[in-house]
């Protein structure tokens, strides 16, 4: 009993000293985390007249199936398939599971660790072992040894090393959640972009094919006139050249479509060989831009949420590094039974136990702890800069999307007007050539102008759809129109 009391008194004295030191040092090493300001004005206007103001990041915001705003059933099927089978997304999900497990691993340090040991053995000692007493010779003995014991250890986290480690691991888990959401957002937006590129090529290929049909008719018409001696050989050669050029362009467009088709197969988790999407003339309406939506940027962007969590991780790591300045306090207790006969293992004389506490304090490490703290502080400064840069890039992407949407909307209207004008010019040129009032060069020029304007109109429409996709991506995935 006296021994137990003495050990307990020593442990209590050491604990009291360490608690007092911890209270004087602020109990938990390192600074508490406070999200820094992004350094943006509270309000500013873009060139399109839409106002922005800074929001509060909310990395738990549900974004939903934002691609459904385009109303395309084929796109919806591809997106859903990618959510299930895309390998990059599966990898990011596994990374999230690992990050969550790591939180449990680190959190275990807040609790006592207990173990149990049991085992029989038969031991022979050496007669030539070093003497325990010079007056007594050693003898070789053979005996049994049966043991059953337990151990309990606990690190008193008075200076926050374990708690800061748990804080860091928790922030890493939240960062992995935001990274998964960002991977999903990037994947879904890139899939939608490639899909609309493919559909834009479908429309452009259709325009070229219609042009080829008209040019083949024109070639047959000129050939007949040439056979009658009305048209010249130059007219015939010029029309043949135009037709051949457009056939070449058609093949090149088909090659480009194949590349987008294969990319869609890979993103949706399907092998490229044998993957087919039938051509379709896509003429969906461009989603309307909601007024005031940029105010939600910082609340919805998962990459910004990830950058903000990275700051929390770096801040907690400063505390972990600073905790090395303070002592490590460890309480240990061991007990059990030890006997040379199994029948007497649980008798009172077979009981053994130990209880103690230890304090370990580094006195000199050549500046290692100080350097580690500086590294952690530099990592935090870098994380802050990355966060602010992410915010600035987000605002730039949204501003680009808004301005491009407005400009492309006007360009689309103008391009449709130019197509109608080019069609009228072609009709007039054909009439003048038939009446012998113009050369066939005028017809060819009008044909090329119409084809160019038609393709430009299709390309502008495709750019409008792509801009809508990338604007949704810039906004963190979808939006809600404010009433």
Image: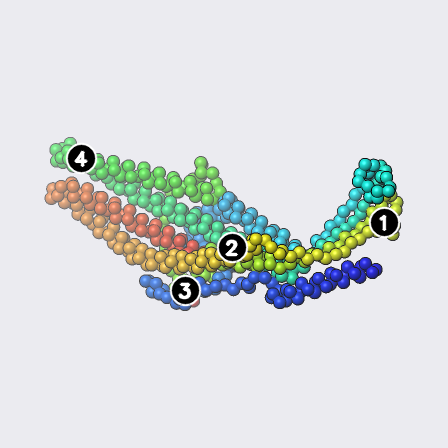
| Residue 446 percent coordinates (x, y) | 20, 45
State the CA–CA distance, disc 2 to disc 1. Answer: 53 Å
Residue denoted by label 1: 350
Residue denoted by label 4: 236
In this picture, residue 331 sits left or right of residue 73:
right
For the point 62% across and 56% down, which residue is it? Answer: 363
For the point 78% across and 49% down, which residue is it? Answer: 149
Q: Closer to the N terminus: mark 2 or mark 1?
A: 1
Q: Closer to the N terminus: mark 1 or mark 4?
A: 4
Q: As displayed, is residue 31 above or below residue 364? A: below
The crowding category of the residue bearing disc 3, from other C-alpha atoms within 10 Å (few below 14, some 14 to 19, many at least 20), is few
SS state under label 4:
helix
Indicate which label's residue lies in the foreground, 2 or 3: 2
Tell me, yes or no, if residue 436 can be seen here: yes
In this picture, residue 202 sits left or right of residue 319:
left
Indicate which label's residue lies in the foreground, 4 or 3: 3
Indicate which label's residue lies in the foreground, 2 or 1: 2
State the CA–CA distance, disc 1 to disc 4. Answer: 114 Å
Q: Quadrant of the C terminus?
A: bottom left
Residue denoted by label 2: 375
The crowding category of the residue bearing disc 1, from other C-alpha atoms within 10 Å (few below 14, some 14 to 19, many at least 20), is some
């Amino acid at each position: 009993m006296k021994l137990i009391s003495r050990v307990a008194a020593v442990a209590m004295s050491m604990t009291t000293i360490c608690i007092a030191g911890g209270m004087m040092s602020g109990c938990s090493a390192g600074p508490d985390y406070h999200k820094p300001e992004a350094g943006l004005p509270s309000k500013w206007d873009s060139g399109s007249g839409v106002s922005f103001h800074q929001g509060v990041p909310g990395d738990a915001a549900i974004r939903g199936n934002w691609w459904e705003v385009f109303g395309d059933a084929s796109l919806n099927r591809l997106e859903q398939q990618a959510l299930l089978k895309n390998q990059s997304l599966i990898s990011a999900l596994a990374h999230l599971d690992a990050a969550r497990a790591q939180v449990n691993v680190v959190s275990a340090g807040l609790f006592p660790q207990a173990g149990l040991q049991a085992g029989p053995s038969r031991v022979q000692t050496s007669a030539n072992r070093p003497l325990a007493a010079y007056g007594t010779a050693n003898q070789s003995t053979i005996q049994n040894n049966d043991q059953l014991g337990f151990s309990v250890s606990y690190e008193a986290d008075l200076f926050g090393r374990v708690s800061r480690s748990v804080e860091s691991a928790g922030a890493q888990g939240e960062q992995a959640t935001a990274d998964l959401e960002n991977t999903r957002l990037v994947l879904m937006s890139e899939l939608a972009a490639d899909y609309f590129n493919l559909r834009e090529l479908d429309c452009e290929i259709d325009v070229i094919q219609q042009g080829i049909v008209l040019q083949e008719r024109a070639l047959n018409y000129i050939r007949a006139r040439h056979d009658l001696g009305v048209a010249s050989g130059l007219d015939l050669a010029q029309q043949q050249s135009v037709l051949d050029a457009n056939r070449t362009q058609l093949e090149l467009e088909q090659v480009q479509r194949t590349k987008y088709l294969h990319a869609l197969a890979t993103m949706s988790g399907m092998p490229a060989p044998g993957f087919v999407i039938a051509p379709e003339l896509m003429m969906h309406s461009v989603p309307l831009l909601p007024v005031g939506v940029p105010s939600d940027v910082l609340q919805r962007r998962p990459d910004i949420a990830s950058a903000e969590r990275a700051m929390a991780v770096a801040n907690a790591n400063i505390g972990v590094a600073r905790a090395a300045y303070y002592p490590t306090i460890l309480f240990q207790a061991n007990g059990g039974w030890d006997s040379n006969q199994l029948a007497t293992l649980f008798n009172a004389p077979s009981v053994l136990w130990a209880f103690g506490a230890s304090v370990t304090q580094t006195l000199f490490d050549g500046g290692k702890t100080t350097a580690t703290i500086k590294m952690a502080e530099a990592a935090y400064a870098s994380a802050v800069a990355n966060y602010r840069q992410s915010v600035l890039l987000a605002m730039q992407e949204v501003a680009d999307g808004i301005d491009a949407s407005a400009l492309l909307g006007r360009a689309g209207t103008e391009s449709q007007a130019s197509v109608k004008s080019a069609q009228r010019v072609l009709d007039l040129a054909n009439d003048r050539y038939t009446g012998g009032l113009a050369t066939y060069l005028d017809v060819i020029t009008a044909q090329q102008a119409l084809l160019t304007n038609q393709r430009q109109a299709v390309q502008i429409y495709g750019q409008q759809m792509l801009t809508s996709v990338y604007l949704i991506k810039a906004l963190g995935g979808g939006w809600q129109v404010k009433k």
